Amino acid sequence: MAPDRFPGGEPPWWRPGYRWSDFSTFEAALLANAALWYTSPARYHEAARVIFDGLVAQNVRYVEISFHLPIGRIIGADPRDILDAIHSAAPAGLTVRVFAGMRRIDYTPDLAPVIDSLHTWDRLAGIDLHGQEQWPLEPWSPPVWRRMAAAGKVTKAHAGELAGASSVRTVIEQLGVGRVQHGIRAIEDPAVVELLLSHDVTCDTCPISNVMLGVVPSMEAHPLPRLLEAGVRCTVSTDDPFCFGNTLTDEYAALETEMQLSREQVARVARNGFEVALMDEAERAKCLAEIDLAAP
């Protein structure tokens, strides 16, 4: 994304030790830079190809990626064309699953018919509620999430990042999600931790993002070890690499060197990712076997 726009050829937030002042500043930078690039399905294809090539270079076998559903209206493109453009960039050896993301305020008259049809999109893996989690859920969202789940799609929501444990409870009880993006602040309420366990919900954590956004003060203070000890299924992801300058390799390295997880715990996190992945059983078994070989 136009690195020449930045002194030194890279965004300042890629520099070691960088911290975002607040979520609004981060979000503004993300959207401003995305608007420069994501102007057509073809540009989505080009960006996805670069991203996927970078993942393959890290030996990543499976990725879940999302796009902001309202962008179709903004750039005058059918979001299904964006979905197809991302899929068409997938290289051999990398399983790609694409999700549609939306905010709690995006059920507008022009977008509502699109949202109401998402459960019929064959190549769409599922949906994700993202953006400001402090905003209340609107009446439209529970029916949409239930309809998606009934169609066999994966339902996600961002919660337990900027807002506390109660936001995790809300998306589980009202949306019935099977995956919570972040979810780390569930640790603030033992009853919510129990809710994660009783509903078999996975928390897709993003430790580097959490530190850079000030959700936690340091990697050493991150709740991930406590969630794992409580039996919560947690995975590790990169969140928004453009704004955090991170790779999945960086995330796993931080688990061992900064968070001080044991090799067995790191392997458990990796296994968790493949256990919830949308892949055929033979491929899943092969990936899990490779983790077992690498683990002590």
Image (tube, grey):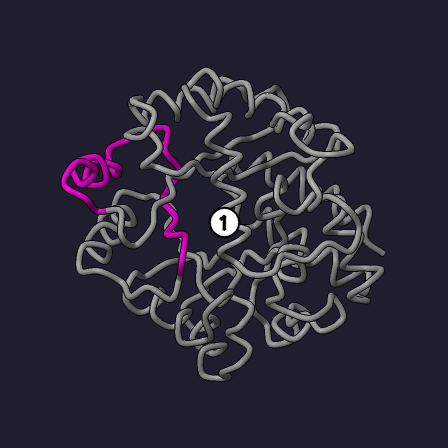
Q: In the image, is residue 206 above or below residue 190?
A: above
Q: Which amino acid type is marked by label 1?
A: Glu
> Which image quarter is the C terminus in?
bottom right
Residue 178 placement: quadrant: bottom left
Give, as a single range, the part of the protein colored magenta: 107-132
Q: Nearer the viewer, residue 115 or 243?
A: 243
Q: In the image, is residue 121 above or below residue 269?
A: above
Q: Nearer the viewer, residue 64 or 101?
A: 101
Q: Nearer the viewer, residue 6 or 79?
A: 6
Tag count: 1
Q: Residue at x 14, y 41 (%)?
A: 109
Q: Is residue 264 left or right of residue 193?
A: right
Q: Position of residue 89 (x, y in %)?
A: 53, 19
- Secondary structure category for the residue under label 1: helix
Q: Is residue 262 left or right of residue 73?
A: right
Residue 157 placement: quadrant: bottom left
Q: Position of residue 257 (x, y in %)?
A: 85, 60
Q: Position of residue 237 (x, y in %)?
A: 61, 49
Q: Is residue 143 left or right of residue 89?
A: left
To which residue does mark 1 refer?
27
Residue 122 placement: quadrant: top left
Q: Is residue 130 magenta?
A: yes
